[in-house]
Amino acid sequence: MIKTQKGTRDIIFPEILNWQDMEEKALKIFRSANFEEIRTPIFEATELFARGVGETTDIVNKEMYTFEKSERSITLRPENTAGVVRSFIENGMHKKPVPVKLWYHGPMFRYERPQAGRQRQFHQVGVEMFGIKEPMADVEVISLAVQFLKSLGLNDLEVEINSLGCSECRTKFKQALKAAIKPVLNKLCPDCQSRFEKNPLRILDCKVPECINELSSPEIQKVIGSDFICEECSTHFNKVKELLTALDIKYNVNKQLVRGLDYYNRTVFEIKSNNLGSQNAVCGGGRYDGLVEMLGGVPAPAVGWAMGMERLNSLLPQKEARKIDYYIVSDNQIEAVKMAQKLRENGKTAEFDYQGKKFGKQFEKAGKIANYALILGEDEIKNGEVSVKNMETGEQNKYKTEEFLRG
Ligand SMILES: [Zn+2]
Ligand SMILES: [Zn+2]
């Protein structure tokens, strides 16, 4: 038997009901905030991710599905911000009035060791907002994330924020951080040792216990806790905090929050959910004002976030299948199928018996799957009538077919 590949899985009934719910809520909420959906290709030029995600990231170094076709190096997207930015540039969206507000959902691919809730083909939903450098944009996308999560029923949320500052702020911070880490560098994991030169900030992200332990030393914590951001960056961050407070969004400042990707500047954030007892990061994002230019576009500020849909789904209760509106009980299949089609045209859900089963069996089926049985017996057909039985209460009424269909 041929089976799914390691790290991939089928999303089937009833789990698919949760996925449809997430997608419907996303469409509704993002549309209400005037975000347009964007669907970029699943594969892109490898170079896009090397430049857009960062050559020093684990994603680019270890986790990409890369292959050659006609001497071109192609990669299955490991995330979608780079693809959206490529599309923004390629389609000249910088000429449109700002802001340009986009959202997406779909599969991403990373070659990781599969663990609970971590797939090689996984799904993300995310938003990207281009053209606004003001703090209100940061807060708008954070509040949209909160609204989306609440609409799914995740209420116990914690927003963590930090400011990475601009490149000048970061240079100062990196120098101080390196000076503090250097004495214990040989105690850190091999990944962190190579991060030390290439991107020391990412050491703050390391999940290896020894690294977490070393970073908790007072000397290093003092550097992490101190303020390296310049006046302009500081004003921006204060405004973000002020606006979050004004919108009643509770947050904590987490100075160790850097996010895993190279391109962020100023505001970065994570949202954690305390649903089902354990705390889980469900959303990560931030500002990336330099990325559009880095990928060859006219400079444009941008801010966005992504959420892992497998993680979200794992926090949601399983949705129950909804009953259909009508099951048509009849021994005249032609009339039954015609009635089903009319009901469906009227926006109702309707089914009928395909196999010529006895009335009793058809009623049994109606009781299991439908709110109403619609009975089309010989008499009803002859008189242009339908009998409708409420399967919950047992109440039954007869109507003229035309009147019934007019509702
Ligand atoms: Zn700065
Ligand atoms: Zn480490």
Image (cartoon, helix red, strand yellow):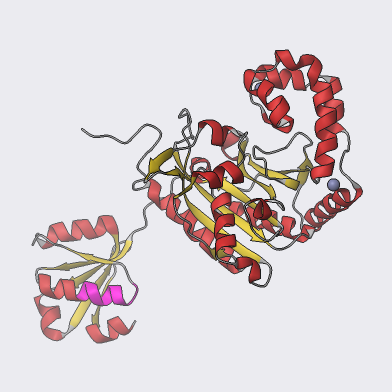
> In the image shown, does 61 or 156 lie closer to the viewer?
61
Name, please, the residue furthest toward the top: 187
Estimate the x, y position of residue 298 in percent, counting from the top left: 68, 61
Q: Quadrant of ligand 2?
A: top right
Question: In this image, 298 relative to 315: left or right?
Answer: right
Is residue 392 positioned above or below 333 on the image? Answer: above
The quarter in which the C terminus is drawn is: bottom left
Residue at point 79%, 36% (across, down): 255
Q: Is residue 225 left or right of residue 197?
A: right
| Quadrant (top left/top right/bottom left/bottom right) for the N terminus | top left
- Say if residue 11 shows up in the picture: yes
Compared to 295, does 54 lie above or below? above
* Residue appearing at x 50%, y 46% in the figure: 309
- The boundaries of the magenta stretch are 339-347
Quarter location, residue 218: top right
Q: Position of residue 307 (x, y in %)?
A: 57, 47
